[in-house]
Amino acid sequence: MDRNQSHRNRRRALKALHFTGLFLTMMIICIPGLWIVLNSFRPTVEIMAKPAIWVPSFTLEHYRAMFAGAGEGGVPVFSYFRNSLIVSVTSTLIAILIGMSGGYAFARYRFKGKNGYFVGLMLFRAVPGVALSLPLFIVFAKAGIIDTHLGLILAYVAMNVPFTIWLTDGFFRQIPRELHEAAEIDGCTRWQAFWKVEFPVARSGVASAAIFAFLTSWNEFALASQLTRSVGSKTMPVGLLDFTAEFTINWGGMCALAVLMIVPALILTFIVQKHLIAGLTFGGVKG
Amino acid sequence: MTRRRLPEWFVLLLPAIIVIAAVVLIPLLFSLYSSFTPYKLTRPSTLWKWVGTYNYEKILSDAKFWAAFGRTVLFLTIVLNLELLLGLGIALMMNKVTWGQRTLRTILMFPMMFSPILVGFQFKFIFNDNIGLVNNVLQSMGFDAALPWLVDGKLAMFSIMFAEIWMSTSVFAILILAGLFAMPRDPLEAAKVDGCTPWQSFRHITLPFLMPFIYIAMTIRSLDVARAYDIVQIMTGGGPARRTELLWTLMSRTGYVDARMGLANAMGYVSIILSILFTIYFFRKLSAARAELGMAG
Amino acid sequence: MTEVTLSQVVKKYGQHQAVHGIDLDIHDGEFVVLVGPSGCGKSTTLRMIAGLEDISGGEVAIGGRVVNDLPPRERNISMVFQNYALYPHMTVRENLGFSLRIAKQPEAEIAKAVDEAASILGLNELMDRKPAALSGGQRQRVAMGRAIVRHPDVFLFDEPLSNLDAKLRTQMRVEIKKLHQKVESTIIYVTHDQVEAMTLADRIVLMRDGHIVQVGTPLELFNTPVDTFVATFIGSPPMNLVDGVVRQGQITLDGGITVPVPVTAGALREGQAVKFGFRADNLMPVGHAVEDEGAVYELDLPVTLTEPLGTETLLFTKMAGGEVQAKMFNPRPVAPGEQLRFRLMLDKCHVFDATSGLAVRG
């Protein structure tokens, strides 16, 4: 009886510990983000107040200023948003096409030095953005594509291709080879067999690889900060810097722009989270 | 068979190879060359002057460089290990959750989707000594002094690590959790019947099974350790007085502020080699762990 | 006319040679089964006929046309895969009609052909389901339906039944045979299961290590195996082989039993080491045989183990130091260790050379 009792107590204690730990983890994950959202709705006076004001008031002042455009000393958010969207979407589409073709090669063909090629491609992804931005700046300047969408798109395609290969390789590998063979016997060319059978089957996986590439482009800063100069090509992560002056930072305005950046990312993440995990683990585990 | 042509796999890989060569390889070759010149952006003619390994000798004998290098390695070691441990802990806790797991898992993924620069600003705000959340809370609880989170060298390093860990622990937690889901139940049950304590069955059964997943997470992380640059650049810019200077911030200051491209590119190469070593190391660990569990093929 | 002809067909993977110059003529409408242990090259041969593997040497001709370099879609064949290879994103109807749609047939004709195939295989109820919602047997049927829809010249089956449970396998075997009677096309069927080969084939091609060992009707392989490999591979239980030596016109088995040389055997040298082979059906306890036995040889053997199968019982006995299986019809209980008098039917016995394994036949 006693032993049962002690085991029961122990189990209860563990349960409480488990709950507390989980609760704290979730708090730490959520509070910083919520803090940003909250402050995007607070008047600047209140953000700067000393001592701190704990009961927040509500204002749309920062959003109004942000969307009012550059004329009133605000930040040209629309242009930044548009640039981000154009660059991210285009680079994602191209990276997916190129990456899918590479991923397919790794998943379906046997060739000498396959592992070497794979790791080699990944290593290019490991080159730090800062280290690349210095020479890339000079090369792009020579090519005359500094401060253009094209330049940034090119850079992001190169950056996203290796990881897209990793993910799509994993997804294609999950599809039995016989499916392709059956399609060929049913009268398909290799090209048809891919688009009519393998691609539709791997569709959700490819979609999550696309979203991953999109988010990488959407969030990238180190390259964008050097390759873009003007309102015509600056993306939102670079735009965040517009809220900083020599000694002060417009926190409210920055938070509002941050919210604008996060919301699309969160929605996309929510849609693909399941496939994303599958892709990462299949790519790696069943290598 | 009769016609001589490029193998199909190569044709399929070609676009990837071309784009990477054009956008990454060529600039890297250029920077490799320029790292042997005293190239300054302001004086283009300096690009044609060959100085041999002068830049490398200079950085290798520079105490500031070595300080930044050592700090970077230390930073990565601490951060990666803590992320792994915390990620493992979170995954184990999540695995035990019976209710609302999907929601919790989605929340867990949030930080992965934050732009690193945004994470930098976010924590710059939260750790602000005057109006930051942390100090406000501390002061409301009765602490008088405002802690100089980003001004004091040690506290600044802590704040940066906190931000970095906040951003990247999710990768580990999510992938390890996926490993836990994929784990077969039988061995654990057999261990229980055989009389293993929870710790023993974790140590001898769960952990070995999770190793490939841990290495996947490590490999993925090692691909973009340099994201920390964005955070540090925003939060402290390497300051105060170079106390949080990492390889990447030092390089960007040398290149962009001082315009000494040759020197900066030499540092760039050191950082590239560092990143590549990390990646190769974890790739090897990954294939070894895979082979051990018979998952290869 | 769609005969399939293989001449000197070779498959190499780098240094490793998987198929060593195979010659085979398959007639129009014939049901040929390629059978052999795993790794014998049977699947590779089938895949070369299908066009899924490059042919390293020799020629494959379908309907008199050499197809070595043609892609699968130009060979007018269809294939049923081991794991069915149904398209998971399409319904059963779409799966069946896929090949015709690729060939840009008019929709009305596609619908007609699909319905016809569906009713042959009893799939009408399942047409709007996706493969994931089908059972193993149903998937198998859809895979077969997909194969017959386009009226190919040749059907290829690659171990189609090995993923089914035993009962379903027997049932599908019958359906495949019926299907063949209905469509009258040439069928090439690969399996590692000799029962499938025996029951389905017009002709069996038995392969080992990339070579053809014997080609013939099921009964030819069963009754006149060319060597010990065929003898033990075909038939269940496998043929008993006992080591022996030729002495003075008789065969002395290890352990001292001496049996007369069967009339079917050819010339034997004095002192030649042989393997003496007979099937369990040809060693029966006295009084339990079912047919006229011809020349017999009687001997006493101890029973070590019995396996009752209903109409018959398998008896495990010791003979010449080895284990030998016998059969008893009209069974009665036999206690382990019991001595029984057995009759060996000499006319049905085989003699193989011990070193080459080849049958010695007159």
Image: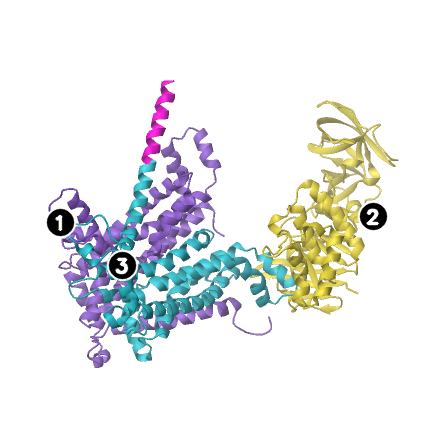
Chain colours: A cyan, B purple, C yellow
Quadrant of image for the N terminus of chain B: bottom right
- Callouts 2 and 3 in the same chain: no
Tell whether position B203 is magenta.
no
The image quadrant that residue B4 belongs to is bottom right
Quadrant position of residue A45: bottom left
Q: CA–CA distance between discs 1 and 2? A: 109 Å
User: Hey, what amino acid is under mark 2?
Assistant: Gly
Kindly report the distance in space between the C-alpha atoms of the residues bearing marks 2 and 3: 98 Å
Is residue C2 left or right of B289 when viewed as pictured?
right
The numbered mark at residue B146 is: 1
| Tag 1 subunit | B
> In the drawing, what numbered circle is on residue A255?
3
Residue C78 coordinates in the image, percent (x, y) = 69, 60
As rendered, which of C325 and A284 lies closer to the eye?
Answer: A284
**Is any atom of residue C353 visible in this view?**
no
Q: How many marks?
A: 3
Per the picture, the main secondary structure of the magenta-coloured stretch is helix
Which numbered marker is on residue C362? 2
Amino acid carrying label 3: it is: Cys
At x 81%, y 28%, the residue is C330
Residue A12 forms part of the magenta stretch = yes
- The residue type indicated by label 1 comes to Ala
The magenta segment: A1-17
Front position in the image: C21 or C155: C155
Percent x, y of residue C113: 74, 60
Q: In this image, A7 relative to C265: left or right?
A: left
Within 10 angstroms of label 3, few (less than 14), some, or many (20 or more) residues?
Answer: many
Mark 2 chain:
C
Return the x and y of residue B74 as percentages of the image width and height.
23, 52
